[in-house]
Image: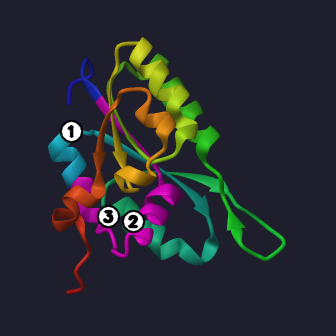
Amino acid sequence: MDEKNKSVAYIDGANLHKGISGLGWKLDYRKFRSWIRQKYGVSDACLFIGLITKHASLYTSLQSAGYRLIFKEVVYDGDGKAKGNCDADLVLNAVRDFFENNITQVILVSSDGDYAPLVKFWQEKSVSCTVVSPAPRKRCSILLKKTDVSILYLEEVKHKLSYTPK
């Protein structure tokens, strides 16, 4: 993609994983990367994810599939559950990219209403924006829906993106 028409995907890794898992299927991340490249012309797929050492092979696999990983240090709650909230990092990177890299189209992969102000920012700046929701229509945030952004629900393309063991 030329520098005048740069398309970037901002992917909330935890939201994507949780949304798809909640629907009872597994996403093939390699197919997904190819699909967002073909459907939306995404040249840069930024996957925001908590950094947990034991998942190093997953990170290597995601990078080889074409994702640019942006790690967040995780903290552990009282029950020992890892928490790597990447929302602020995603927003900061997206706004910085807009001002520094001439972004003309964005794909936000999340169902989280915390991103509604970011969607509104892009709309105000005349950046073409699509939300790809891991959650089904009834569970995608009303705050995102109220922005009138175009939303595609991953369950609608499950047949193209689900992981099938070889």
Type of amino acid under label 2: Ile
Residue 164 in the image: state x and y as whole percent: 22, 80
Which quadrant of the figure contains the N terminus?
A: top left
Q: Nearer the viewer, mark 2 or mark 3?
A: 2
**Residue 111 x, y percent position in the rendering:** 45, 48
Q: Which residues are magenta?
A: 7-34
Left or right relative to 46: residue 163: left
Q: Which residue is mark 3?
A: 29
Residue at position x 52%, y 45% from top?
112
| Labels 2 and 3: the sequence-earlier one | 2
Q: Earlier in the sequence, mark 2 or mark 1?
A: 2
Q: Is residue 144 above or below residue 98?
A: below
Magenta-span inclusion, residue 153: no
Q: What's the amino acid at mark 1? A: Tyr
Residue ID for mark 2? 20
Classify residue 62 by image quadrant: bottom left
Q: Nearer the viewer, residue 52 or 90?
A: 90
